[in-house]
Structure formats: C-alpha cells, structure tokens
Amino acid sequence: MSGFGFSGFGFGYSRPSPVFVDRTVTTPMRVAGVNERFATDPNSNATRNEAVYYVPKWLGDDYKTLCVEFHAFLISVNSQYNLGNSYTVLELSLIAPNGQQIALTYGGLTSWTVADGAAFQFTDVVWPDQLGYSSSFPKGGKFILKAKIRVTSAGQKIPCHRFLRSYYGAGEAQVLWYNAGATTMSSANAPGLFTYTGTAPDTSQESMLAFSLCGNPIVDKYSKLVVGDSIIEKEQDFNPTDPRGIGYVSRACTDYNNGYANPRPLFLIAISGGDNRFLLSSNKINPYFGLAYTGIDPTGGNDFIQTGGNLTQVQNQVAAVWAKMRAGGVQRILRIKPFPITQSTDSWKTEANQSFQAGYEAALTAFYNWIISKKNDGTINYIAELPNIRAAGNQFKWNSDGVTAFLYTVEGTHPPTFGHIRASLNLRSDLLALEAL
C-alpha cells in the first residue's frame, strides 16, 4: 500500500526554504521514469549478502509526487514466480537534478523487509518542495536512485532486470556486492557514487535493480506501458551513447530521434522468448497495468509458436491481455501490427529472396485482419503499422535496399539497431496521433 506522507531528508542535507505546495492529488499513480522495467532476472552473489545500486532515472513528464515501486516476484517466458526469499531495504534515497537528496521511507520507516512474493509496493510519496521545487518535478530531469539492500545469506536473490549496468557510461551506474563485516560501504543517503573501505566489492554483476520511479502526474495522459518479448526488451539494439532509448518502443517514448526533447514515461513488462502466458498465468501482475494511461501491445508472434499456429487460441490470449489492461486502468490501447518473420537466401538484401514458413503468411494476415476488426468495434484504439520496416510488396516481409545484408533484420525475426530506429520513427508519430484523439 502506498503511503502518502512526508519523507525524511537525506544524510547530511538541510531542509530547503519552505515552499507551499498544494497536497491535493487528482491523478492516479502512474509510471514516471522513461525506461522502467519489471523484474525478469534475480541478482545474487555466491559469497556476499549485501548490494548497493546507483541507478539513473529520467523523468518522462511533469509530476506532482514521486515514489518508488518495488516487488519480490518475477516473470519468466510463460509464467510468474516468487523471488524465493525476502530482502531488506537498508537505505533508499533519491537525488534530484538540482542536487538535493531525500531518504525514501515506507510507512514512515527508513529500513524495511520485503516479503517473498510481495507485489506492487510503493515508498511514501515525495512532494516537490521536499526536493527544492515549487510545484512539480521537471519533465526530462535526471534523478538518481541509490539503494542499499541485504539478503539473509549469500546466494539469495534481489529482483533485477536485463537492462544492464554496462549500458550506462563510465561512472554513471553501480552494482556492488559485499559483506558488511569485511567492507564498509558509504551510505545510500550520502551524495555521489558509493565509496568503500576494506575488502573490494564484487563488481561483476550487471543486472540493474527493478525498482521503478512512479508518481502522480500533473496531467494524466502521457504514461505508457508495453508488454512483449525480446524485441521489446531491446534484442539486437545497441545504443552505447545513452541508455534512455534502447529498443524501438523505448526509443519512441523517450523521443530519442529528437534528442530526448519531449519524452514519455514508459513501463516495460517484457522478457525474451515470452508469450502471453506470462501475463495470464496469475492475477498478481494485474495492478501493474494501472501504471499507464496507454497500453502498447505487440504480442502474438511467440504465441503462434506456443500454440502450434492455433489462430483462435492466439486471439483469445491477446484479447485477455487487452481485458487486463482495461481492468487495470489503461485508457487507450495501441496495437502494433505483427512484425515480419521470414527466411532469406541473400541475407535479407532483397524482398524477392525472402520466404515464409509454411502457413505463416496466411496466419499473420488472418491475425492482422482480426486486429483490424477489434479496432473497428472499439476494443482497441489504434493500430501502429510501422511501414518503415516492411517491404513494399508484402507487409509481412522485411524492408530492404537491394544491396545491404541484414539491414532491417539480423536473422528474419529481430531488427538490428537500424531497424529499431526506423520502427521508432513510425511509432513516435503513432503515439502522438493517439494522444491527440
């Protein structure tokens, strides 16, 4: 349960000059960060039982409040499952773009234990004046989340995801595992990167902490949530210069192609190889659909594989996901037209030398026609066609230039960085068009 109270201030910080802020909240709790992700990977260390995380967070809109969502269960390719152990948040703080820092609390506590299987838990909210802002937290601002977490014994897990520490620049993010008896780690309530004395911590872990920046937006219209598989996670997309935009949906929401000038908040519930069973296997994940005004659904490709090409079953699974979105609080649903999946005899240099597995073109066409019918009857609100990635002569073949190998796909299923960028340009326009309706 989210606590709507005042939070304490960070270690070594004094209260800024009082600024009156209306404490009235008129919008629902939504995702606030531009690249927030549900837990897919448990992070652990065989010989150490405490970890610290230094995680940059960019705000996707103007927000009246901010808080952090945390949980202790994960998604797999076809199910949801508990973490397997509890963990204790020893310290958690948020550093604002203006440099001010605040210690986050949960029910007024500065340290708390998260039970195994816990879901949809929120820290107490922070108000703008508590971090030196007059009326709202600024869109596009870079915040830092600092966390110090303990598990009972080495080998136990902390919920993380596959957005890795190495995606950030040098000195931009940290994941450090250590034993308190051998290493003295600086406080999460102190400014700057974590420092230590004593035995050097283990720096080999890459998975980042699945704690998401959320809050009450000033205007409830722009937050997005996307479900999906490896393409949504960012498979084959590499953006070493800035971690705000990786994967075509993330790039579209962060406004990557326009220098991040007009971002949107985004929460990803996606895992490589996943089909819709991971969303439908349990109701525990249902509240997370309420974190966004707009739900984005590109699913179905892996469902065809999982069901052996059973179109009716795929349609039922996709429709059930839409129903969960609506029940959770999603106001608009944007459906992505099914991606191409082909074979090629010339490394996808041309359209002519691409072909389909038996029956696949007909299945994709029938699935797409059904999607159109759901748009026409009002079940969903918008279909994103993504013409940039599609061949001129066949909507389910990959685009090509007649010369370049692997330009739009690396193996017939996943787009490379170029393909992600081209798709994101289309999707960005679609998102803005849907917002204008």
Image: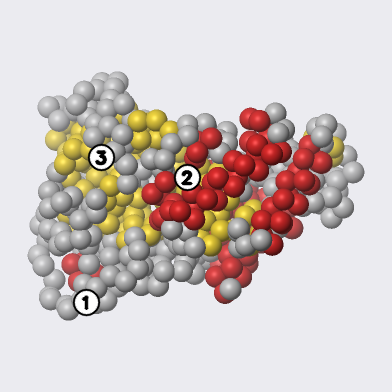
The residue under label 2 is 269
The residue under label 3 is 52
Q: Which residue in the rendered view is the most extreme toward the front?
A: 377
Give above or below for 214 relative to 75: below
Q: What's the residue type where badge 1 is placed? A: Asp
Q: Secondary structure at mark 2?
A: strand
The C terminus sits in image quarter: bottom right
User: Label 2 neighbourhood size at 10 Å, few (<14), some (14-19), many (20+)?
Assistant: many
The x and y percentages for residue 111 are: 14, 43
Is tag 3's residue or tag 1's residue first in the polypeptide sequence? 1
- Visible in this render: residue 120? yes
Q: What residue do we see at 56% from left, 67% from top?
A: 258
- Disc assigned to residue 22: 1
Cα distance between the residues tagged 1 and 2: 33 Å
Q: Nearer the viewer, residue 318 or 414?
A: 318
Cα distance between the residues tagged 3 and 2: 24 Å
